[in-house]
Image: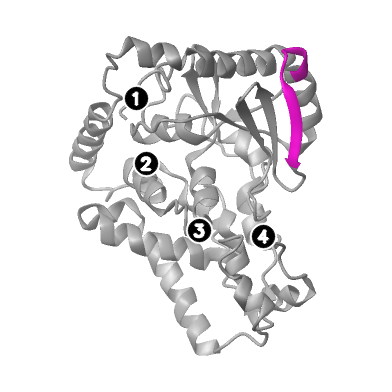
């Protein structure tokens, strides 16, 4: 049986060859050997802090996933120097995580009750993330159900699912940081094996953000457009045409606050537009997110290079649900009840 998003069913030989080629591409992108002992020693303290934090959480039994540069390398083979460790966890686990890290000598702080805390060891730190800064990508059971096993810094743990990483990164559209290239690399590396129905359900009423990124992906990788399933492009085009025929939304809404914390301040402060709120996914989307997948762990495809990530940071160069419905008027009407975003 061919999963949604896989290559054409009748072309199995081509599909296997393509997957082998992409595996080779990812292997070729492994971090180069680092031959500067002084530089390596200068980073030993950073790695020790990350290892100590992971050991504290593992020993305390706190459920967590690794995200950030480590997960990005696992899925794409692209090395990115990182100054910290990003840990994803359920908000309810934050107090237990803080206690475990404090016992290991860290100082902890809840930076923003909406989405992030930190654990410090001197000037080095660990991020504990339980949502996204816009409040949309809340870590829930689905993250853990679809997380992938990996070995990071010598420890077996989970990394965040590629679908949730894309969902989070798709809304990062600041002047100083834009994660669209990361989204493109993740689709290129993992698109044939991703659960696209679940990803669409994650976006819910904000499917236009996904469509924008998929359009950019098709531009960047014209020779790999098929890694995004045709049914998804058809569905998003259908929604776009339906929305176009319906005309403008009835309210003066600006949802720029969901993709940038600062760049749309003028629209709210000077033009009087109303901010778009984070909203619950529609019923169809919740069904797709909540159902238990029936594939066994043994049958689950490996996405990217999930083997040994212990060298990352030591080296430097440097499905089963239906797609959500088209946006309903209620999504935009609800925006009227939200305050203007903070600075």
Q: Earlier in the sequence, mark 3 or mark 1?
A: 3
Secondary structure under the numbered disc 1 in the rendered image:
loop
In this figure, which residue is indicated by the disc labeled 3? 174
Residue at image point 74% right, 15% down = 60
Q: Nearer the viewer, mark 4 or mark 3?
A: 3
Q: Determine which of the numbered discs, if any, sits on residue 316 in the image.
A: 1
For marks 2 and 4, give the CA distance. Answer: 24 Å
Q: Which residues are magenta?
A: 102-111
Residue 104 lies in the magenta-colored region: yes
Closer to us: 319 or 273: 273
Identify the residue position indicated by label 4 in the image. 281
Tag nearer the camera, 3 or 2: 3
The residue carrying pointer 1 sits among few (fewer than 14), some (14 to 19) or many (20 or more) residues within 10 Å by Cα, namely: some
Q: Earlier in the sequence, mark 2 or mark 1?
A: 2
Total of numbered circles in the picture?
Answer: 4
Image x and y of residue 33, in percent = 27, 17
Query: Is label 4 in contact with label 3 (beta carbons under 8 Å)?
Result: no
Does the magenta portion include 166?
A: no
The quarter of the image holding the C terminus is: bottom right
Between 342 and 216, the one lying in front of the other is 342
Residue of label 2: 190
């Amino acid at each position: 049986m061919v999963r949604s998003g896989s290559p054409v069913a009748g072309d199995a030989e081509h599909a296997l060859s393509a997957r082998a080629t992409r595996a080779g591409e990812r292997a070729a992108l492994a971090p180069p050997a680092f031959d500067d002992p002084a530089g390596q020693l200068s980073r030993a303290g950073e790695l020790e802090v990350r290892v100590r934090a992971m050991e504290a959480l593992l020993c305390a039994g706190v459920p967590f996933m690794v995200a950030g540069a480590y997960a990005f390398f696992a899925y794409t083979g692209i090395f990115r120097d990182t100054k910290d460790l990003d840990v994803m966890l359920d908000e309810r686990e934050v107090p237990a995580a803080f206690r475990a890290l404090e016992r290991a000598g860290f100082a902890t702080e809840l930076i923003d009750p909406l989405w992030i805390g930190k654990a410090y060891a001197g000037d080095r730190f660990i991020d504990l993330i339980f949502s996204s800064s816009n409040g949309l990508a809340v870590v829930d059971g689905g993250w853990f159900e679809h997380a992938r096993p990996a070995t990071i810094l010598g420890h077996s743990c989970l990394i965040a699912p590629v679908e949730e990483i894309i969902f989070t990164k798709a809304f990062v559209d600041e002047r100083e940081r834009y994660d669209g290239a990361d989204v493109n690399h993740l689709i290129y590396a993992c698109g044939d094996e991703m659960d696209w129905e679940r990803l669409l359900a994650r976006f819910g009423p904000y499917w236009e953000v996904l469509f924008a990124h998929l359009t950019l992906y098709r531009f960047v990788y014209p020779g790999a457009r098929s890694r995004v399933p045709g049914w998804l492009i058809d569905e998003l085009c259908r929604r776009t045409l339906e929305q176009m025929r319906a005309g403008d939304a009835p309210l003066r809404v600006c949802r720029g606050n969901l993709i940038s914390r600062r760049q749309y301040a003028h629209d709210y402060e000077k033009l009087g537009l109303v901010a778009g709120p984070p909203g619950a996914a529609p019923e169809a989307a919740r069904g797709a997110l909540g159902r238990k997948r029936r594939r066994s762990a043994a049958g689950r495809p490996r996405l990217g290079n999930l083997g040994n990530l212990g060298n990352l940071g030591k080296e430097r160069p440097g499905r089963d649900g239906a797609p959500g419905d088209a946006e309903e008027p209620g999504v935009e009407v609800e925006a009227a009840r939200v305050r203007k975003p903070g600075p």
